[in-house]
Image: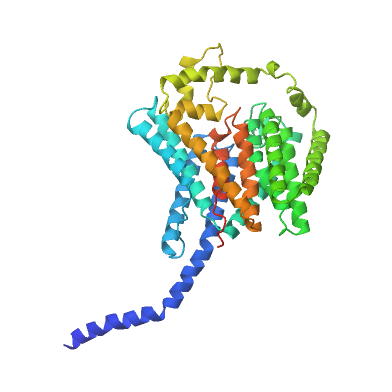
Amino acid sequence: MKAQATLYRYPEAARMDIDARLPEFAAAGAREHAVAPYVLVAGISAITFFGVLAFGATEQWAVVSIEMGCAFLLLYWMWSATASRDLELQWNAVYVPVALFGLIVAVQIVAGRSAYVHATRVELWKYAAYGSLLLVANQFGRNATEKLLKILTAFGTLVAIFALAQYLTYNGSIYWTWPALPTSFGPYVDHSHYAGLMELLTPIAFALVFSRKMKRYEQVTWMMGGMLMAATIFLSGSRGGMTAFTVQMLFFAGLLVFRTSRRMLLPVAATIAAIAAFVLWVDDGRVLTQVAGFREPLSNVALISRYDIAKDLPRMWRDRPLLGWGLGTFPIVYPQYKSYPTDLVVNQAHNDYLQALVETGIAGFACVAWFIGILYRSAVKNLRAGFEATTNRVLGPVVGCTGILVHSLFDFNLHIPANAAMFFVLCGIATQRAISEY
């Protein structure tokens, strides 16, 4: 009987001890809740930085590293969300087209609708990694988002400084070590893909400059960083980058007028003039040569070949209009539709929208259009909310996404894993809810 009494009293004593320590457990949970967003910020920063520095993550080892990093990041977010009772999933309409597009690709694999299932499966893993980045970034609150944007801007500035130094002392190698193509710039093998990265990051710096919360020295720092990143877009010699940057700066100026007044046009014009002056001062003649090419576009061999590819794509689409040939199968299927002679391997359509149409059909293309529509609808809604913090978080990312979406009309930046990862992170931020304050 004594033993039974002892056994009866022990659970009660244990319960009382746990009750007494509940404040301690609650404090530990609160600390975890406070720390988790910044761990996620560090994770996203590490993944995107690695992709950029690893030659744009175009090699398979770099792609696998990004996918593993995204998987661990998503698992940590799920664990922190489960461990903290007051951290809930905030629903967003942007998840619907993202999920449907992934479902379409999965159907291509399972139903054997892909021309090469292995290639489609590889692309689906990449897409899942990008989707996890969008989800995590979309769940950030104000403080974590602002910190991430500053980190990304600082990183972009450092990459631009490196790219400028390599441009001035170029020896035919990336990092002055790895042999590269004549079109290489910064850590990227292709100058247009470097320009795509800068299109994403430059507007964030300019948006920080126009934030009233920034101190004067911070505004000067971000302005210098933004001007340097913008200048390297032109120094890279990418005509697509120059065009996209021009469009996004017009869009940026329009949003500033929409949010404030026409007086903001003067500092924007002065910034553009300063960028042009710096480019002309540093340029060794290559930029002016590329700009002169806009006068006679039909003399540009690369532009003509892209036009020839675009002419072939309608025939390719008509043979599989609904679900397409399979994500990632363009370089495999296109040769049988090629109508012009060339010894070169056509690995991409140089138009991300047309390639999405032929690879995923009308169903996938509709998801892409739906996604873009939600991106801008959410951004405009957030800007109209009128909150200073919300404007600062949305303005830079949505303008950055605009630049690469324009560039995607005549290039394949969204097929470069580093740029695609950065794009989806910024889309996650731009589509955040107007009020989110942790």
- Nearer the observer, 141 or 73: 141
User: In this rendering, does residue 69 appear at all?
Assistant: no
Residue sitting at x 52%, y 12%:
339
In the figure, is residue 353 to the left or right of 325?
right
Tell me the quarter of the picture where residue 275 sits.
top right
- Residue 121 is left or right of residue 225, and the answer is left
Return the x and y of residue 183 as percentages of the image width and height.
66, 27
Q: Is residue 33 placed above or below 398 in the rendered structure?
A: below
- Residue 227 visible in image: yes
Q: Is residue 9 above or below residue 340?
A: below
> Which colour scheme appears in the figure?
rainbow
Give x and y (percent) for residue 333: 45, 20
Question: Would you place residue 22 above or below residue 394 in this image?
Answer: below
Classify the position of the C terminus by image quarter: bottom right
- Could you say where residue 175 lies in the image, as x and y percent from the top left? 66, 37
Left or right of 48, for residue 115? left
Residue at the image point whose x is 60% and y is 29% from the top: 409
User: In the picture, residue 325 is in which quadrant?
Assistant: top left
Q: Position of residue 128 (x, y in %)?
A: 45, 42
Among all residues in the image, which is located at the extreme left? 1
Q: Nearer the viewer, residue 395 or 185?
A: 395
From what the image shows, is residue 109 above or below residue 162? above
Report whether 398 appears left or right of 81. right
The quarter in which the N terminus is drawn is bottom left
| Marker count (numbered) | 0
Front residue (pair 172, 250): 250
